């Protein structure tokens, strides 16, 4: 097979760092293949991507060892401007890549810098928009597009340069399921139909299992394994030891296999898993599950007939009524634009309803000051860095208490308790931004806990996190729930929440489409589809088992499914 890119014994050290980020990497990338790069946060995946387009080391400096070439060009000696004609790159956040005032101007920008003729620029814009299915949106402003459309526009801008190789670094991590599906469908078309070589870094195990030709695992800067998705993702235990997540299908069948029901192979895609199930129904027995205890009926937060319209005329909330009770763990889901964040902003008094009301313990929010509300409701934003502005962890945690005029002795006591509960006592004198992202989230939570609120809201807490980081944050939410807090989580990552949430509110187009226990909500496929959500693969496997066996059950997890199989 023809090689489009080659790395030979590549190692790299950033300036002012002592440890190698990449260690003796040798890798051939073949023309027309889809190569997935997977690994835990900090493994060096982004750095490896930047080597392929010459940005490392040309822009970052540092010390580079070994040899790298793309399309026959040495990435060390050829300038990035030249390499960019052969290598396109799309990164995690499309917002940072879009600069122009219209879709067509965004694509034209780099082409104009290459001094291409006008006719050629117009032809390339048309081809790029067609490739990513954005025809007819030429005059739209990028900020009018959805998250998935913005990422597809970023891909179109890279495609217009007609690269031989397209690199995508976590292109779907900040997108809702619809946007993620749009991007993966686009990339699949570019690879399968146009024959473009794709290198993608992603934690999206289910999609990577379906799309990639090969996967390379990067651990601590070195390639620890490379092979087909079947070879890599079927090794569930090895992946877990590497802090990686196998697709849910692989995890489920590995758990079944572990019960002594020998399988010839562990399937890694939903299609393959569904095909195997009929041969296993003789081992399937009456399923058993344990329901979460019901929360008490003491209503803490209440929305009644809540409606809100944005200044541009968009109806964000339409007659929403919702009771949130003391001590429950509530999950709010729905695609971008469903109204989730708008609803939460009303809980925080950041927005005032056009119609209807919100009350806390029977008191209208209109009659509560911001400081009074902060003592009852804590909010953890998607990016914890946006909530950190003090020079030490201790100052950050004590900041709100100081501003609220608490006595010094009480501030010290509450701060110490909050730091201890989040395991941050030893880091109290460190700068918050010197900590890992997970620990920075702990700092924000500790600052909230110091005020002892009854309700804590998490807005997309797992976005951009690897599997271990996401689980660590969700374990924090579990810990808070066990402390008696009412926990509200907004997320697109349904597959992570089955072990945590008790109740699910499904939103779509500003309305509540469903309000039910998680076991019911996750099995309401038709309702989820109305807001462009799909049940986790484990739930789809459980539904298939129910149809094959005639035994209906609301199973949610791999462990529950496997426990229903016996020799």
Image (cartoon, rainbow, N blue to C red):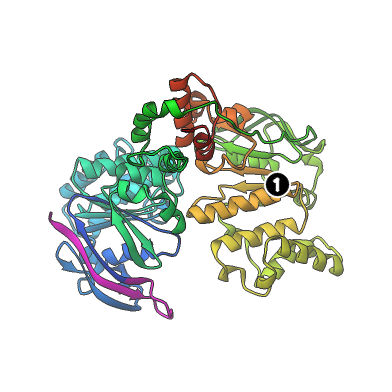
Q: Residue at x 70, y 50 (%)?
A: 480
Label 1 residue SS: helix
Q: Is residue 567 left or right of residue 234?
A: right
List x then y, in percent, for residue 346: 67, 40
- Taking depth in this image into account, of 375 and 160 the one nearest to the observer is 375
| Residue 201 is one of the magenta-drawn residues | no
Count residues near mark 1 (Cα–Cα under 10 Å), then give few for <14, some for 14-19, many for 20+.
many
**Tally of numbered discs:** 1
Q: Is residue 57 visible?
A: yes
Q: Residue at x 28, y 49 (%)?
A: 228
Quick check: 118 above or below 59?
above
Q: Is residue 351 visible?
A: no
Q: Is residue 356 left or right of residue 46?
A: right
List x then y, in percent, for residue 159: 25, 50
- Taking depth in this image into account, of 287 and 334 the one nearest to the observer is 287
- Taking depth in this image into account, of 94 and 411 the one nearest to the observer is 411
| Residue 14 is one of the magenta-drawn residues | yes
Which residue lies most toward the top here? 550
Q: Residue at x 44, y 65 (%)?
A: 42
List x then y, in percent, for residue 566: 49, 33
Please state the extent of the stretch shown in magenta in the rendering: 1-23
- Taking depth in this image into account, of 161 and 107 the one nearest to the observer is 161
List x then y, in percent, for residue 388: 63, 63
Question: Which quarter of the figure is the N terminus placed in?
Answer: bottom left
Q: Is residue 255 left or right of residue 156?
A: right
The residue beneath circle 1 is 481
Quick check: 485 above or below 546?
below
């Amino acid at each position: 097979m023809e090689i489009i890119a080659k790395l030979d014994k590549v190692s790299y050290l950033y300036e002012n760092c002592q440890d190698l980020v990449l260690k003796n990497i040798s890798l051939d990338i073949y023309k027309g293949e889809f190569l997935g790069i997977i690994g835990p946060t900090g493994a060096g995946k982004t750095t490896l991507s930047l080597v392929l387009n010459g940005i490392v080391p040309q822009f970052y400096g540092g010390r580079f060892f070994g040899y790298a070439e793309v399309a026959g060009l040495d990435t060390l000696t050829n300038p990035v401007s030249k390499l960019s004609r052969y290598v396109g790159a799309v990164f995690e956040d499309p917002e940072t890549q879009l600069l122009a005032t219209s879709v067509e101007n965004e694509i034209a920008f780099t082409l104009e810098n290459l001094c291409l003729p006008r006719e050629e620029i117009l032809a390339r814009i048309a081809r790029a928009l067609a490739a990513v299915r954005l025809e007819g949106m030429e005059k739209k402003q990028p900020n009018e597009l959805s998250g998935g459309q913005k990422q597809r526009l970023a891909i179109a801008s890279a495609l217009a340069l007609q690269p031989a190789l397209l690199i995508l670094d976590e292109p779907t991590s900040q997108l809702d399921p619809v946007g993620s599906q749009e991007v993966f469908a686009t990339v699949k078309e570019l690879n399968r139909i146009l024959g473009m070589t794709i290198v993608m870094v992603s934690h999206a195990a289910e999609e990577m299992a379906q799309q990639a030709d090969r996967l390379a695992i990067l651990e601590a800067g070195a390639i620890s394994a490379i092979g087909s998705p079947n070879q890599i993702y079927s090794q569930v235990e090895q992946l877990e030891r590497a802090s990686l997540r196998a697709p849910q299908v692989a995890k489920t069948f590995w758990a079944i296999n572990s019960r002594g029901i020998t399988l010839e192979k562990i399937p890694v895609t939903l299609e393959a898993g569904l095909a195997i199930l009929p041969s296993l129904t003789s081992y399937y027995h009456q399923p058993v599950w344990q329901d979460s205890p019901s929360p008490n009926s003491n209503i803490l937060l209440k929305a009644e007939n809540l409606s809100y319209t944005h200044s541009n005329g968009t109806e964000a909330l339409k007659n929403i009524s919702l009771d949130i009770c003391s001590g429950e763990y509530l999950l709010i889901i729905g695609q971008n634009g469903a109204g989730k964040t708008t609803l939460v902003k009303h809980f925080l008094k950041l927005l005032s309803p056009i119609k209807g009301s919100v009350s806390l313990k029977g008191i209208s929010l209109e009659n509560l000051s911001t400081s009074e509300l902060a003592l009852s409701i804590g909010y953890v934003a998607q990016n914890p860095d946006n909530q950190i502005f003090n020079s030490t962890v201790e100052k950050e945690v004590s900041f709100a208490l100081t501003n609220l005029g608490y006595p010094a002795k009480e501030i010290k006591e509450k701060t110490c308790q909050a730091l201890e509960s989040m395991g941050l006592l030893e880091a109290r004198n460190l700068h918050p931004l010197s900590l890992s992202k997970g620990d920075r989230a702990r700092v924000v939570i500790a600052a909230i806990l110091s005020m002892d609120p009854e309700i804590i809201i998490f807005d997309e807490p797992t976005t951009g996190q690897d599997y271990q980081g996401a689980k660590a944050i969700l374990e924090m939410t579990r810990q808070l729930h066990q402390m008696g807090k009412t926990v509200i989580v907004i997320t697109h990552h349904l597959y992570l929440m089955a072990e945590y949430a008790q109740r699910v509110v499904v939103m779509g187009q500003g309305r509540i489409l469903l309000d039910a226990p998680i076991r019911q909500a996750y099995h309401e496929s038709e309702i989820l589809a109305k807001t462009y959500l799909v049940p986790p693969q484990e739930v789809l496997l459980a539904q298939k088992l129910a149809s094959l066996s005639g035994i209906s059950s609301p199973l949610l997890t791999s462990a529950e499914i496997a426990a229903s199989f016996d020799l």
